[in-house]
Every structure is written in structure tokens, then in C-alpha cells.
Image (tube, rainbow, N blue to C red):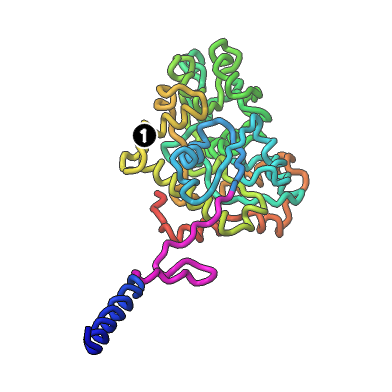
Amino acid sequence: MSRLARILLCSVLLALAGCASQPTPRAPSTPASPPGGPAAGASPTPPPVKQVRVGHQSIAANTVLFVAADRGYFQQEGLDVELVNFSDASQMIPSLSTEQIDAAGIAANPAMWNAVARGVPLKVVLDQATFRPGHGTTALLIRKEVYDSGRGHSLSDLRGLTIAFTPPGKGTTNACAMAPALERAGASFDDFTIQNLPFPDMLPALANGAVDGAVSAEPFMTRALQQGVAVKVMGEDEMYPNFTVAFIGFSGALYNDRPTAQRWVRAYLRATRAYLGALAGTSSELSRDQVDEIVARHTGIDVATVRAMVPVGINPNGLPNRDSMLYCYGFFRDQGLIPQPVSDSAMQALWGTDIVEDVLRELGRQPES
């Protein structure tokens, strides 16, 4: 081979070797996320799940709470809500004050006002149950034989009768709601004898003639009417329209944890509106049958009775009726059931509805009529 041919052959071989050694091109890598946050366009990191312990009783007044828990409204807000059952409502306030629970359904009765007077840092936040028109879940019943005899047809016609109230009688929110109606009728609690009986004992007492009437609540009211042992005279929605009989109270710690408190309120308001929509037949999220099943599961009341009961009333914006609660404060003070007055500073600190107002600015208000 000539010298020129050898040079040409070496050049070709070197060129081939150089091509073989070139690296295979790679697709460009995704840029790393900047420190401290996700890459641009990524979904924000959800807030950490927070556990909230809620005291309750297995009664229909907690319908919205049960709906929020069962239908996932709390979970959607990143809340792990544990429902803690209490057999006695009076036990919930001490548990709330010591932060064994974070929230609870409470009545504005003497026990609540006395706790506030002692400096217990609870907050009135949300409506739990209100006697809105058509939602008188408590009512005055008169035994059918008494009613048929011509007595007990109105609040002005109770003189000499024996009427059952839950203990301690006039020291209950049901008595407080009845007081202004008695006054309008020209009557008073002095016109009749109060017999202290728990709600479950009122039905047999009416049936056997031990009492002439009862201020009875659901489901016992419906059962008494279905069995024909009593006649309904007046619901407490007529005695004191829009009277808040129970509210959701927060502990000081939950109230001060604003992000968690707002998430809780948002879930509860969404459940409130889904519930009211189910009653009206306008909800796309919840049906009346589903509501009845939820209430039956949590209370042990059969579904047929739940469906026949007067449904719980609640403000669509979640706001309790402050005026009715303050009326009860004065009513119980007049009876000597709140010996130590609530100071002006404690009264001002009691209200935590500003959290509800914050959430309403986001969700929007609804008509309350």
C-alpha cells in the first residue's frame, strides 16, 4: 500500500472512533423546586390535619354536627373531629374549661352563666338549635282527657294544672322561652304546679294521668301525639320565635387557634346549608332521607319517628340569637339562679361570633327570614 493510501485509511478509522465516543443526547431535566416551597404551578401543600374533640349528646339538636361529621365536611377542611359523647350536658362545661374537649353544644342555662361568672373562658360561636318558625322542637302538650274536658287550651288556661318540665323546672332554657309568652297571655308560672321530670319520663306520666301537661321535646313529643295521649297546644317557636336554645361553644384554645377555628366554622356552615337545603328539597349535596338516616344512626331513634319529628331549626348564617340568650341571663338572675353577676368584661369576652363573620365574608350570607 502506498504511503498516501495508508494516511487516508488512518484518517477514516480515527473519524469513526471519534463518532462512537460521543455521548447519547439526554432530555433536559426538570428544574429543581426552589428551597422552601413547591415548583411554580404546583398545588399548595394542604394544611396539616388537626384533631378537634367535640362534646355532644346523642340528641336531634346535634343534627348539623352529625351531618358535618358523616358527610365529610370536617375532613375536607383537614380536621379530624372526634365526637365525645356525654350523658349529662352539665359535664361538658368543666371539660371545655379544662380543654379536655375543644368544642361542645351548650345551653344558655344557669350552669353556663355561672361558669362564665367564675371566669371560665368559653366562647359562644355558632347556633346549634333555634326555635325558628315551624321548628318548635319543644312544645306545651296537654293530656288528652284534660284537653277534651275544656281545660288547657291556651297559656292563659293553665291555672291549677300540673305541668312537667325537665329539672330544675324554671331553671331551664325551655322555661325561659315560655316566660315572655306567659306574660303576653296575662299568666305566670305561679298559675300552675311544676313537676320536674326528665323528657323520657313525661310520656308515661301523661299516659297514666300523673301530670296534666308537659313541656316536651322531640322525639317524646311526637310519640305522645302519635299514641294519642296528649294534644299540642303551642310550640316554643310560637312562644319565643328565633329563640336560641343551644349553641356551639369553643374553648379558649380553639378560639385562639384562628386557622383551625375558621376551618371548623366553615365546615359547620357548609353542613348547615346542606341540611337546610335538604329540608327544602333544594340541596344537590344531601337529601331529606339521608338526613333522617344520619339522625337515626346517632340518636338511636327509628327512622320513621325521625321523619315525623319537627326538624331542628338553625340560622343559615350560623349566628345564635344573642338577644334571646341575654334575655335568659336576666330571667335566671331574677330567680336568684345566677348569684354572682357576669362582669361587663366577661360578658364582652363571651362572644366569639367574629370567627363566623370572617367565614361569612368568604362564603356569603343567606337570607334569615
337 sits left or right of 310 in the view = right
Residue drawn at point x = 61 percent, y = 27 percent: 165
Rendered position, 236 above or below 42 = above
**In this orientation, which residue lies closer to the viewer: 170 or 216?**
216
Question: What residue would you read off at disc 1?
Answer: 288
**In this orientation, which residue lies closer to the viewer: 136 or 256?**
256
260 sits left or right of 252 in the view = left
Rendered position, 343 above or below 304 = below
| Magenta-tinted stretch | 26-50
Rendered position, 128 above or below 166 = below
Q: Residue 197, how many percent across, how many down?
A: 64, 22
Q: Quadrant of residue 343?
A: bottom right
Q: Residue 300, how many percent across, how many down?
A: 51, 24
**In this orientation, which residue lies closer to the viewer: 346 or 148?**
346
Task: Name the residue furthest front.
Answer: 1
Q: Quadrant of residue 43?
A: bottom left
From the image, give the main secondary structure of the stretch colored magenta: loop
324 sits left or right of 235 in the view = right
Q: Amino acid at mark 1?
A: Arg
Badge 1 crowding class, 10 Å Cα cut-off, few under 14, some 14 to 19, many 20 or more, is some
Residue drawn at point x = 34 percent, y = 40 percent: 280
Q: Residue 7, how many percent across, how many down?
A: 26, 87
Residue drawn at point x = 62 percent, y = 55 percent: 255
Q: Residue 349, how many percent across, how many down?
A: 67, 57
